[in-house]
Amino acid sequence: MSGMKFHIGIVGVSGYGGGEALRICAAHPTFEVVYVAGEGSAGQKLGSRFPSLAGKTAELVIQKWDPSALLALDVLFASLPTGESKAALAAVPSSTRIVDIGGDHRFVDGWQYGLADVWPEQVRQSTRIANPGCYSAATLTALAPLAAGQMIDPASIIVDAKSGVSGAGRGGGNTYGYAEVNEDVMAYGLLKHAQLPEITKGIAAIGKMNPTVVFTPHLIPMTRGILATCYAHGDATTEQCLAAARKFYAGRPFVRVTDTPPHTKWATGTNLVFVSYAADPARKLIIAIAVIDNLGKGAAGQAVQNANLITGQSETTGLEGIAVWP
Amino acid sequence: MSGMKFHIGIVGVSGYGGGEALRICAAHPTFEVVYVAGEGSAGQKLGSRFPSLAGKTAELVIQKWDPSALLALDVLFASLPTGESKAALAAVPSSTRIVDIGGDHRFVDGWQYGLADVWPEQVRQSTRIANPGCYSAATLTALAPLAAGQMIDPASIIVDAKSGVSGAGRGGGNTYGYAEVNEDVMAYGLLKHAQLPEITKGIAAIGKMNPTVVFTPHLIPMTRGILATCYAHGDATTEQCLAAARKFYAGRPFVRVTDTPPHTKWATGTNLVFVSYAADPARKLIIAIAVIDNLGKGAAGQAVQNANLITGQSETTGLEGIAVWP
Amino acid sequence: MSGMKFHIGIVGVSGYGGGEALRICAAHPTFEVVYVAGEGSAGQKLGSRFPSLAGKTAELVIQKWDPSALLALDVLFASLPTGESKAALAAVPSSTRIVDIGGDHRFVDGWQYGLADVWPEQVRQSTRIANPGCYSAATLTALAPLAAGQMIDPASIIVDAKSGVSGAGRGGGNTYGYAEVNEDVMAYGLLKHAQLPEITKGIAAIGKMNPTVVFTPHLIPMTRGILATCYAHGDATTEQCLAAARKFYAGRPFVRVTDTPPHTKWATGTNLVFVSYAADPARKLIIAIAVIDNLGKGAAGQAVQNANLITGQSETTGLEGIAVWP
Amino acid sequence: MSGMKFHIGIVGVSGYGGGEALRICAAHPTFEVVYVAGEGSAGQKLGSRFPSLAGKTAELVIQKWDPSALLALDVLFASLPTGESKAALAAVPSSTRIVDIGGDHRFVDGWQYGLADVWPEQVRQSTRIANPGCYSAATLTALAPLAAGQMIDPASIIVDAKSGVSGAGRGGGNTYGYAEVNEDVMAYGLLKHAQLPEITKGIAAIGKMNPTVVFTPHLIPMTRGILATCYAHGDATTEQCLAAARKFYAGRPFVRVTDTPPHTKWATGTNLVFVSYAADPARKLIIAIAVIDNLGKGAAGQAVQNANLITGQSETTGLEGIAVWP
């Protein structure tokens, strides 16, 4: 910490994840964004890319990423395309804590997996954090109480997830063009989505089990939000599941356990996760549901929560805002 | 048939299902709409409610429903709220064939369940048709080849469905208001949706099995379309599932079996169903996917297909149009 | 005409305008699509690009455009990016009638401007038709009765138009990405949009006047539809404007004059134009409104109307369908 | 001010304007919401209506509005349907400052019109503030520099505005149902919208002129945002208009003057207004554009800005957040 505020850098600031990190940091009471880098937007003032920014943050010039030229940063948020952060972050000095929003360091040695609602202490003691993927964040938060309590059969897990389009990042071109995404829904990545190994490892770590997961993501016509509907065999009743979740997440500020199925809109613009449960006794089947903002808990909100922890602050600093509704 | 065309009536014409029936019938070469009834819109000319209508159909006056005042209709399409069609249709003369788009007569004695892609001959020989529900139409078309081939464990079926908002009908008020449905997704009716018994009975009838189904519908921000993602245990490979479906639906004009996951938009404005399959050998789990237009194959398109059959015409008459895209 | 049907070609078939031309032609009773060309999609079967297509049209292979290799086509629809059709169409044999949906031949010698609702006879006698731009089609249809009747001051015309995203074509990439277009509206092309000269020339030709037009297009978050709100000085009352329009368009099958402001949704999927008028006596100002489907009357619907005329058929052949609603 | 924070009440909290006031106040450093009232939701805990709320605000019970039972409030935000606030607020004690977000007190004696970006000092000295309407806020902010500088002909003003659906409030029922609003745009309230007199009086007050305004609002398929495109005769160039606006709004924290046409999305979730200008010398016509979030600057953001002023605080307190993007 330099002077009164932590010095923050964001690489990948012109993407959706990096942009959301900027939005949260710009209103954060103890973070000051002093360095921003981006590929296509290098050379522009940050305020020309984010017209609602004001003050000296708006005057920052977006840099071409060069780790050797880094200022003395306290925390660097990295939001780079998959495959690019491993090399890009290797040269960052060890004195700079890193939260990697991208996918390259999840369950990689030397990096703590940043599912802070489940493992806050492990995060707090680390300086290299691999932020969970958006689908994984929703899925693991829903399933964690059941896995930790050995309430589900690890060989029976099915995750059917629905995501808004911003999860695909800015580079999608026509694939995510408005005219074709609007009024459309599709499944994709069947049985081989990039986040399947991460979900599997996460459940394994939480439940000390060896799960086999079926994961089916769907793209739906909205900008923000993920709803994960998870199915698994288990004997528990609805009330037992809800009670297990309430106990597991007692005191955790960002997880809300609800009796009724939550709406993604309850979380828009926040770092919250809403989870709910329903059990079908005739089938010994449990349904676990989670909703998040994919750019909040699924990316930048979670990243700031992690940054709060690794800088020794209260977890909720800068993350207290309520959802944008409607 | 009077003269050259069949005389058609539509009750519930100002709702979404009835309106789509009107849209299809207005372009149908052998159907002529001669009677329309609706609750809130009675007394208005049909053209004032459907401004794109022209000619004499536009001049029809919407009636207050009164079965005793019916003209000599060849076919009556009924699209009434659940619970209203049983009484309303009891007085219709037996010479008028009925296709009930509403839910009251599904799997009821005296009525043929109108899943015409599976049971065309049974439909052809009936005069009282209970049109399938929108979720059921998608689900049953996806699962029929697997159930008929005994390729799935009937105790393992999970259906996770995503629907556009028009499936809820016009009467939803604020629940389905734009500002709140937009940028939102939610699950609803967990374990107790009205179409769960219908789905169960449909699979039972197709597969001569006694299934236990878990059904989770979701509301997503689009007007038209349903995607049903179905999971069940089975040993078959992806290729075996696709081959079974291609064989089961050989010659059926409205069902398309695709190698890749289909988009709902492929079906918009049509009576088509696209089905696809993927099997996870590690889990002995099969994923069956179907997409439809919930107002097409899920309501009025299916209804016209049924009406074609019971009037002795080619199944595809008036239903050959390709999808509205983008 | 070869045998029973006209032989139709479409170049630019994988774009939105070309795709809509295909959709209409596939259901057209006297047109048979026998040739399709496209840039990115060459080599694919047409049915793989348009999954709802069936029959022999689905089996057509998309060609790389080569006018010297053309079959004996009766009509060629060209839907190419601005700047590409001039050269591309120069080599088409004179025996092939052309409807150019693109912008290169509007108000160019040797080509008839294809605003068929205003100039059907001139279109009927031509073999080279320049289809109006989408904004121009809406604007000119709204203003034509007023301009023809000298009811507006040509120096006072302001056109404020709102368009869905498909009007920008498929090539927009991130500019028209879902996540950024959704929940957004903007003005663009202020005072210099490409269709401004076309609108000006169109009003000049209809009204024998020398207008100065201000044109402000806006992009709104929907796929299809244009609403043009036009303002001009004039003494007429609302009723006089409506009466003038009813008289001007008497017998024209695709133009509907309405008392209340029309919705774009009334025209979705059709070749219709709805126009309405309101006059503010305190200001001697007239408001003229038109709504269209930008891919219907604004592109492919208009093109088929033109093709009907130049092949000597009834204008409405294949264009009778009512709007897709909701 | 009681203790450390101002005591805030919100009546109409379950509507969109009241809900946004709650969202802003819940994160406001010197405001504490201690009283909430609502019609349909009375008796519920606030947290059950706004699931992302936490802490003691979530525990507040929504009251049935009863001014005689009011606590000692420092500021009351009223967001009631048009026609209801006049009577409802008459009984509020004079010690409670009121910001009426509803329409009943605009340009009414005893109430200051709360266009704080133009009249901050007048607002600061008042205790009864009539918050501008959403269309008026956008329009007046765009036109104020031109009117104040006598740069436009007051007899020539045309305002063509585009609004998201939340502007219509929660009570719209089917009129604003998702299935019908989606993929639709329409004009409404031609020449007689409720905010026309307010716009006229606002321009009159700013420009000491007697304007005649034509105002055409449009409903477009998005939840939040207004874009107002204003046209008026004037000799100024684009640069002169931009310069006038930069000077007029110098030091005003919420108004941003931009060279290029702004997007509504730049303002989502904020109290910002972006204004831009373009002049057509051939026509001596000036285009003035403003974008806002209709629930921000168009309702609750503006209301909090006003509340900051009348409680003697910095105008930007609690309103510094940047836009939610994408």
Image (spheres, coloured by chain):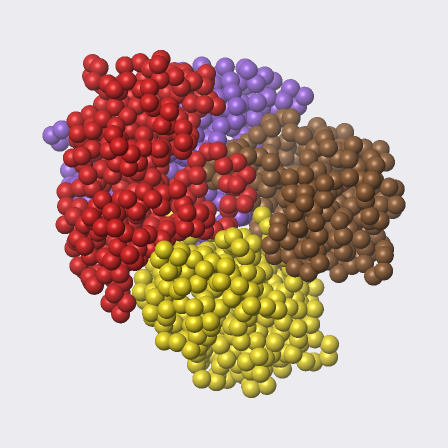
Chain colours: A purple, B brown, C yellow, D red
Of residues C81 and D121, which is closer to you in this image? D121
Asked whether, in this view, residue D137 is left or right of residue C267, the answer is left
Of residues A175 and A197, which is closer to you in this image? A175
Q: Quadrant of the N terminus of chain D?
A: top left
Residue at figure coordinates x 20%, y 29% from the top left: D126
Residue C7 seen: yes
Asked whether, in this view, residue C236 is left or right of residue D9, the answer is right
Residue at figure coordinates x 75%, y 49% from the top left: B35
Q: Is residue A100 above or below residue D192?
A: above
Q: Position of residue B21 (x, y in %)?
A: 69, 49
Q: Is residue C209 above or below residue B179?
A: below
Q: Is residue C189 above or below residue D7?
A: below
Q: Position of residue B241 (x, y in %)?
A: 68, 45
Q: Position of residue A103 (x, y in %)?
A: 38, 40
Of residues A89 and C4, which is closer to you in this image? C4
Q: How many marks?
A: 0
Residue A187: image quadrant is top right
**Residue farthest toward the bottom in the current orientation of the protein:** C94
Residue at figure coordinates x 65%, y 43% from the top left: B41
Residue A300 seen: no
Q: Quadrant of the C terminus of chain D?
A: top left
Q: Position of residue A138 (x, y in %)?
A: 45, 31
Of residues C161 and D65, which is closer to you in this image? D65
Residue at figure coordinates x 36%, y 76% from the top left: C210
Residue C69: image quadrant is bottom right
Asked whether, in this view, residue B59 is left or right of residue A305, the answer is right
